[in-house]
Image (cartoon, rainbow, N blue to C red):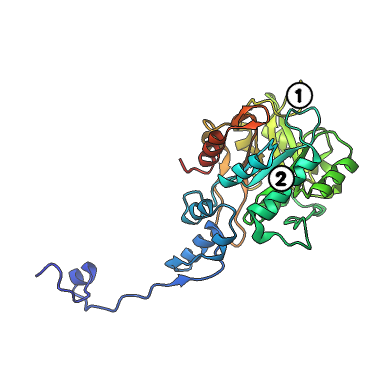
């Protein structure tokens, strides 16, 4: 009888009459853990615990990395891009709350357009102050992504999924700097990208999808979604895509992006589903109140217990006016709430 004889016999062995056994060893993984994907792979291999050190030391936001490792954000959560950053302080605030990408606008008509000098100040601060462990003085731009050419005949889904995985890998180490342009000469875009030290170029105008590989940085190409757009039409439009990422935004006859209006998420959801599902950045009218619903509607959970996790649906969300107090002036509370909601922390 007795309730706690201290003989090491578990309830299961006692009830079955088996002899007491030595407890099984606890297997702990000690290295190579960067995000939730690594944790899940170790778990599938029978590992009981992980010891994390360097990954937290290198993380721009240790709190965010812990949530990722524990699965509270996890590999199922999208990357978050805060666009229209106009100051060093704004950039620091966004990174502090877990932003993965910072959008710097160089399109002159925009109210959020900033000078090259301010952009360089932001880039320097991100690299040397927010993420000094990744900055190497002899490589001032320490680029984490390279321009790649889409192989002839490769399916659009295969191309964009591979690039989405590379983008996510790069964003593990520090926030990525995205320069936003529209209908500007390629030589001007390339000059600014090199001078500032951008990681990515976002093209929001009528730039040809087939020419995106000619820029000096990987390109995120905006594709505008209109009320009469269909997933089939969008998929056909992307057949010649050489951009390394695609951003879906609300189409407008009056302006290029930045409308603050959402489009039908069902169109995006259909584009991301199935064996040929495409990964994309989701933009257009997002804010702290609706981003969780947008992610739920358009995100395809990755298959993580494979050598190469699948990347489909909304792999990133993009916001600007939805977290502002006024054009070009971000509201810190809104930024924090947006990131938390997008990464399913609330």
Q: CA distance from mark 1 to mark 2?
A: 27 Å
Image position, residue 156 (x, y; %): 73, 47
For the C terminus, the image quarter is top left
| Near-viewer residue (80 or 58) | 58
| Near-viewer residue (250 or 310) | 250
For the N terminus, the image quarter is bottom left
In the shown orientation, is residue 53 left or right of residue 280?
A: left
Image position, residue 66 (x, y; %): 49, 55
Question: Residue under circle 2?
Answer: 122
The reply to whether residue 273 is in sight is no
Q: Residue at x 84, y 50 (%)?
A: 216
Precedes in sequence: disc 1 or disc 2: 2
In the shown orientation, is residue 10 left or right of residue 57?
A: left
Does 264 sit above or below residue 143? above
Image position, residue 130 (x, y; %): 63, 52
Q: Residue at x 64, y 57 (%)?
A: 173
Image position, residue 62 (x, y; %): 53, 55
Q: Residues within 10 Å of mark 2 (few under 14, many from 20)?
A: many
Q: Nearer the viewer, mark 1 or mark 2?
A: 2
Identify the element where label 1 is drawn: loop
Label 1–label 2 contact, CB within 8 A: no
Residue extending farthest top: 254
Residue 16 falls in image quadrant: bottom left
The reply to whether residue 130 is in sight is yes
Residue 227 falls in image quadrant: top right
Q: Which mark is residue 74?
A: none
Question: Residue under circle 1?
Answer: 255
| Near-viewer residue (26 or 149) | 26
Identify the element where label 2 is drawn: helix
Does 301 sit above or below residue 185? below
Does 112 sit above or below residue 177? above
In the shown orientation, is residue 116 left or right of residue 312?
A: right
């Amino acid at each position: 009888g007795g309730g706690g004889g201290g003989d090491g016999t578990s309830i299961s062995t006692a009830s079955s009459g088996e002899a007491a056994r030595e407890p099984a060893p606890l297997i702990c993984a000690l290295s190579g853990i960067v995000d939730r994907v690594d944790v899940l792979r170790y778990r599938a291999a029978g590992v009981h615990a992980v010891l994390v050190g360097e990954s937290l030391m290198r993380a721009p936001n240790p709190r965010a990395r812990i949530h990722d490792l524990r699965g509270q954000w996890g590999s199922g959560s999208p990357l978050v891009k805060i666009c229209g950053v106009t100051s060093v302080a704004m950039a620091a605030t966004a990174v502090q709350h877990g932003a993965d990408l910072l959008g710097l606008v160089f399109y002159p008509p925009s109210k959020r357009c900033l000078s090259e000098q301010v952009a360089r100040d932001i880039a320097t601060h991100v690299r040397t102050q927010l993420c000094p462990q990744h900055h190497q003085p002899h490589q001032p731009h320490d680029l984490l992504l390279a321009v790649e050419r889409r192989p002839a005949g490769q399916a659009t889904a295969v191309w964009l999924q591979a690039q989405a995985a590379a983008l996510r890998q790069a964003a593990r180490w520090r926030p990525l700097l995205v320069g936003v342009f529209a209908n500007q000469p390629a030589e001007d875009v390339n000059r600014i990208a090199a001078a500032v030290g951008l990681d990515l170029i976002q093209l929001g105008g009528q730039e040809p999808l087939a020419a995106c590989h000619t820029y000096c940085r990987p390109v995120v190409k905006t594709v505008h979604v209109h009320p009469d757009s269909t997933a089939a039409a969008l998929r056909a439009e992307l057949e010649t895509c050489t951009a390394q990422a695609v951003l879906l935004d609300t189409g407008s006859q009056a302006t290029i992006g930045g409308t603050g209006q959402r489009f039908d998420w069902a169109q995006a959801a259909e584009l991301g589903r199935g064996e040929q599902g495409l990964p994309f950045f989701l933009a257009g009218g997002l804010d702290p109140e609706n981003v969780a619903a947008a992610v739920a509607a358009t995100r395809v959970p990755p298959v993580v217990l494979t050598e190469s996790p699948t990347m489909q649906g909304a792999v990133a969300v993009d916001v600007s006016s939805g977290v502002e107090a006024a054009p070009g002036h971000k509201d810190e509370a809104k930024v924090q709430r947006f990131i938390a909601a997008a990464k399913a922390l609330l």
